[in-house]
Amino acid sequence: MGAKTTTDGATGSRWLTLEGLLPVAIAALIFAWLAQAIPAVGAGEVVRYSWDWVPSLGIALSFLIDGLSLTFGLLITGIGALVFLYASKYMQGHAHLARFMLFLVLFMASMLGLVLADNLLTLFVFWELTTITSYLLIGFDHATAKARRSALQALLLTGTGGLALLAGFILIGTVTGTFELSEIRAQGDVLQEHALYLPILILVLAGAFTKSAQFPFHFWLPNAMAAPTPVSAYLHSATMVKAGVYLMARMHPNLGGTEIWLWTLTIFGAFTAVFASFMALKQTDLKQSLAYTTLMALGTLTLFLASDIGYAITAAMTFLIVHSLYKATLFLVVGVIDHETGTRDVDRLGGLARAMPVTAFAAAIAALSMSGIPPFIGFISKEIKYAAALGVESEPVFVIGAVLLANALMLAVAAVVAFSPFWRNKHLAAELSPHEGPWQMLMGPVILATLGAIFGVFPSLLAASLVNPGVAAILGPEAEPAKLKLWAGVNLPLILSIVTIALGIAIYIYSRPMRAALQAMGERLVNFDRGWDRVLDGLKWLAAWQTDLIQSGVLRRYLFITFLTLLIGIGGTIIAKDALSVTVAWPDLLLKHWVVVALIVAGAMLTLTTSSRIAAIAGLGAVGIGVALIFIIFGAPDVAITQLLVETLVVVLFGVAALKLPRLDDSGRKTHRPLDALLAVGVGAIVTVVLLMVTAGPLDRRLTTYFEETSWPEAFGRNIVNVILVDFRALDTFGEIAVVVIAALGAYALLKGRKQDDPR
Amino acid sequence: MNSIILLAGTRLLVALLLVFSIYMLLRGHNTPGGGFIGGLIGATGFVVYAIACGTETARSALRVAPEKIAMVGLGIALFAGVMAAFFGDGFFTGQWLFIGETEDDKGLPLSSVLVFDVGVYLVVLGSILTICFALEEAV
């Protein structure tokens, strides 16, 4: 997305369109509505709304506002409003601006539903909706193959995770007997002690890890940067990818607190964080670099959610907010740079600060917060992270090592992203001609960056309103959150901070040689993205192979396999159940019955022996009419009429088709005949046996009696067959006639399609 | 097929079959018949016509493309099911209107069930003619 659509930001009023303004207003209104709940939630209240949705399945449309969901809700709507404003300008002049904004608003609504849901299945529905809207947004630029591929990759990966999540939720529902999160929570440690705990944990974490792009499912996130920048800023840094983190935080009381939870999250989180930081340094594209730092943040959040100590959860909650603020800012800044210069290659950019002072200002503050430099909120967040790492139950040295390395690399990346383009002395290529972005695109970065600074100086604002209620929502009201302080005295975290800063600066200075080394190394490592392609190719190959195997295109083989399956299925069941009990008695038949039987037998024999197709068709017709006669004799006129009419039409159809078919005595088919005959006799025998067994027992007449009794009083019809068809079983009939239409259209397409292929 | 007997017979038969098909459709609720059978009879009429006079003539006599008839029929059947929603009942619950109802006589019954059966009639008629005409044209 390097298109410079309209670079003259000053031309005023065209952005004031419905599709530009309405989304901003919606997001801002929801933000304001949520914000008024801050005092109540801060005081420990929990607001709950519930409506019945599918009561028979225990699914309610219930929403819960507590510290955790409120924090997420405010981030989603607040950053949403700013991103929408930004997007209305960024995408101005795009032919599908309205569509783009609609997708964004739909995404926001899904995400809000996800974090506010108090019912596991409601949560799951919104979870899938975020997957779908994210697919639409990543693939928005659908004319390019890369966007399509990235969108599909994200959809398949997160969708697979979503399926696992659904399975996990259903297991939770069977264990606890409810899908309401608040009720599950009230049950205490039921899940952790249940035998199904491990499968539940694996399934739920599979959902969370794919959504939040934890290693080894990380590769879709950097690819998702194919989306327009506002999408990257909103979905793939501030909100959607946090859905997995949200889920882990939400399930923390129910699934957390065990050894396996602690170690799984610690190891995956730590590895993702460090791995992603190195990858971030490797990139030259600013957006790619930021994408990997998002992975690092997600890894860090996972790492801290592993623990149950107050410090760790406080660290997670604080970092969650801090990261959203600075990462959205930086993405938006990169978007401004891209929009105004046409490139985001860090090697081509430099000295932009003079031309874009406001952007440079926002970028600098966000980067300082990201690097953890005082007095910004990022510093406090980093201090808490170190304090928490010192106290975790798993392995403090390991956690501190991972966090320290990730933070130092983060500082270096922050410098690369926010310092190099603006302050580095570099002569810009003339065609870039940078200038400041329009105000709509600056408002977001400036507000978000400034918030980072304000919270840094007054951390208690954040602590009282969001962090502490959030910690209480995860750990319970009696939990003790860590205090957010700018100056906590000279202690171990402070020393670690100083080490981080020194290490980070060193990495930045040597970033170019390091990048070269990493790129060289990256060539030799396993490439997950390419591996993904191979998996998809394998899947396609498998599909092609089995289609070739099953779909031979030879009608005779289809029929043979179908009837063989019938024979083996029924025969096998009878033998396996040892159910064979046939008593053959001489039937008590009248002359008219014998005539019908003779007609059917004669028709069948004619069909078998004749070498003329027309004769065979006539023989088959005789069989059909014989069957219709049986229906008439035994009092089923409706069925008989239908049978007669269908028989007539079939003869006509066959008669027409016969003109095109090869002769019956064609030598190729002779070789199949013995085998076909064997199968036919077998199927005939097995069906006879089944019929004899069925009629041997007493018929269950309950349904028949019901229909006989209710047909007239309730459905006002005396013809039971018809009443069943159009009233009692109308839905079935509807399905059947739908099949009839589809079959007709299929036949039509085949016949007409063939005609075009071979113009005669 | 150029047979004068068939051609002459067809004129009578087609009209009879079509009237009979409607008759079967309408009486179906109480006596043998119904949308399915009616549709089959109606289709038979047009098939006979197509055999005698060619599919092109039959198509123009039908006026509307058979595949469209089938689709419209499916839509009517669906509508009959959805109709119940307007009265607060479950999907496909029959809705009845008795015109001129007295103590011991139900009068003229009209129902969503009949609408559904008309849908079935059109689906069957349209589907069979779609296949038949296409097949005859392909050969």
Image (cartoon, rainbow, N blue to C red):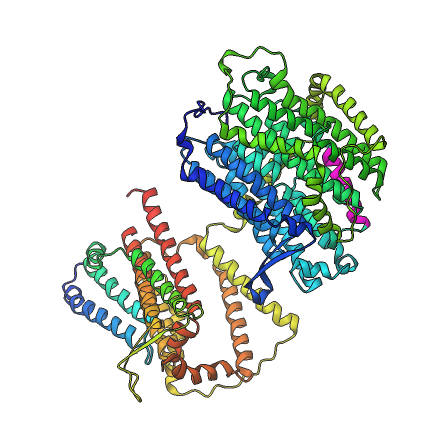
**Residue A209 in the figure: left or right of residue A223:** right
Between A726 and B10, the one nearer to me in the picture: A726
Residue A395 percent location from the top left of the image: 85, 40
Residue at image point 49% right, 30% down: A440
Q: In the picture shown, does residue A50 fall above or below A668?
A: below
- Measured as percent of width and height from the top left, residue B127 is found at 33, 60
Q: How many numbered marks have been drawn onto this rendered protein structure?
A: 0
Drawn side of residue A198 relative to residue A148, left or right: right
Quadrant of the image occupied by residue A541: top right
The image quadrant where one finds the C terminus of chain A is top left
A262 magenta-colored: yes
> In the rendered image of this protein, does residue B115 appear above or below residue B56?
below
The residue depicted at 66 percent of the width and 26 percent of the height is A367
| x, y percent for residue B4 | 14, 63
Residue A671 seen: no
Range drawn in magenta: A259-273
- Picture residue at 54% right of the left edge, 65% below the top: A566
Asked if A484 appears above or below A169 in the picture, the reply is above
Q: Quadrant of residue A121?
A: bottom right
Taking depth in this image into account, of A328 and B99 the one nearest to the observer is A328
User: In the rendered view, does A333 fall on the left or right side of A465?
Assistant: left
Examine the structure image and report whether residue B50 is included in the region drawn in magenta: no
Is residue A633 or residue A241 the one in the foreground? Answer: A241
Type of secondary structure dominating the magenta stretch: helix
Q: Residue at x 54, y 36 (%)?
A: A82
User: Is residue A133 shown to the viewer in this render?
Assistant: yes
